[in-house]
Image: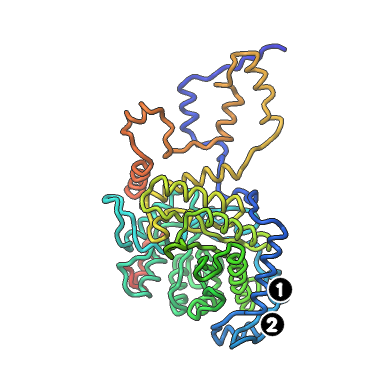
Amino acid sequence: MAKGRVKRGGRKERLAMRAAKPLVDPCPPGQTGGQYKPLQEGELRQIYETALELLERLGLGEIPDRLKGDLLAAGATECLESRLSFPKELVEEAISQAAKTFTFHGRDETRSIVVGGNRVYFGTGGAAVQTLDMQSGVYRPSTLEDLHDFTRVQDVLQNVSWFTRCCVATDVADNYDLDVNTVYALLKNTTKPVATSFTIPEHVAPIVEMLDIAAGGPGKFAERPFLKAHISPVISPLRYGEDAVGVVYECIRHNIPMSCITAAQAGATAPATLAGFLAQSLAETLASLVMVHAIQPGFPMIFSNWPLVIDLRTGAFSGGGGETAVLNAASAQLTNWLGLPSGVASSMTDAKAIDAQAGVEKGITSLAAALAGGNLIYESSGMTASLLGASFEAFVLDDEMHSLTYRALRGIEVSPETLAFEAIRDAVLGEGHFLGGQNTYQAMERDYFYPSLADRDEPRTWARNGAQDAWNRARQRAADILKDHHPTYLTPKQDEQIRARFKIL
């Protein structure tokens, strides 16, 4: 064979190539999940059949009168002590008629995502009452200013595909003012798909007026809803919550998509055995789906079955263990097996500091949920201290972690080009290495993710550059975003209209 020598570019050209945006993003959101299957087919079937048995033999209790009428009309039957039984036929009808995919719009359409199938997206959730202060390094009560700042930070993070308010503004005492100002912070600071919760049903309609202003006029939001509601209409074990059910009715009336969240806790409000937990939690989330089906069949609902764990020694919530990883992965697998849009929770470290514990717990739980194919992975950015805290540094570190996860999900492409026979030939018969070869340059652009926060310097260079740890690097990145990123996503006229109608704090 003739030796093929490849001409290498100069150092200046190589540096320019490294600084340029990749021609192909090696790890964009929306990668395909489903590779990890903690449950076998027979085990999926057993859990599902047990959930159906729970719904038929025990049913749901504490059902508001309005919902009771709709459920009976849909095919539920009365059973023990004012509880309603859900026959298997009703549950499977609700599954068959449910929305399997739908578009979760951003106000900027380029930021919209399609929910369902096998696509994986990381986003946020949570209601942290404390914020890790970037100056002091200790926790303090979360404020409305923090919520605005968190929204600005995530607006530039590519792997936060939708933003749910991650903290509660504890300095806003009135619940109506809290709901209003939470949504205002989302509208002012991001055009991604967003989500919030409503304290009571009466808060929904006026807030839709605010959403209409941002959307361009009366009725415009309902034409293309860019906000979804987080609601927990079923309280474990197996009963409905009146206020949350009322919010469901209002959201359907105003065309607000919903994440109906089941948040049972193993050993407290659900069985401590993992299989028993999954059966009860699945039954409860199916009860939310039957409720939506009875009100309006096919209305967009994320099947948000979030298995939560407590430390059985103390009763404290634990979000970062291996049990959380496997339970949420199994939940995603079950939901996808039913063909429904899945929502699970991950990256809920119990650590207070941004340290090795945080990295381990966030990494293992978020990777497991993604590999199992969770469509929307909540709580996955910024959450610390067993969901009691939120951190600006964690937001930017988690964003980089999600890129690594997406790269893992993307896998390995095998083709004549990537098998690289000619590149191996040229190296073997030529200079004996692959540095500077055209195949290497192409792979560099296409196949590799280059972190900006993780440190890859050798020890002397690291020391010369200040010997910083990840927490300090992330703090500086977050501070730079807050200093430089001041979006104006509401026009002056829209802002004036909102302020004239609502008490904006």
Mark 1–mark 2 distance (CA, rounded to whole Å): 10 Å
Which label sits on residue 18?
A: none
In the displayed image of the protein, which residue is found farthest to the front? 313
Residue 159 horizontal side relative to residue 98, left or right: left
Measured as percent of width and height from the top left, residue 135 is found at 27, 50
Residue 54 horizontal side relative to residue 21, left or right: right
Q: Could you tell me if the residues under marks 1 and 2 are in contact, i.e. CB atoms within 8 Å?
A: yes
**Quarter of the image holding residue 181?**
bottom left
Measured as percent of width and height from the top left, residue 330 is found at 61, 58
Residue 175 vertical position relative to residue 335 in the rendered view, above or below: below
Residue 462 visible, this orientation: yes
Q: Nearer the viewer, residue 94 or 364?
A: 364
Q: Which residue is mark 2?
A: 75
Residue 86 vertical position relative to residue 5 in the rendered view, above or below: below
Measured as percent of width and height from the top left, residue 327 is found at 57, 58
Q: Nearer the viewer, residue 482 or 347?
A: 347
Q: Which residue is mark 1?
A: 93
Q: How many marks?
A: 2
Helix, strand or loop at label 1? It is helix
What residue sits 36% from the left and 62% below the top? 492
**How many other residues sit within 10 Å of disc 2, few (<14), some (14-19) or many (≥20)?**
some
What residue sits 47% from the left and 47% below the top? 360
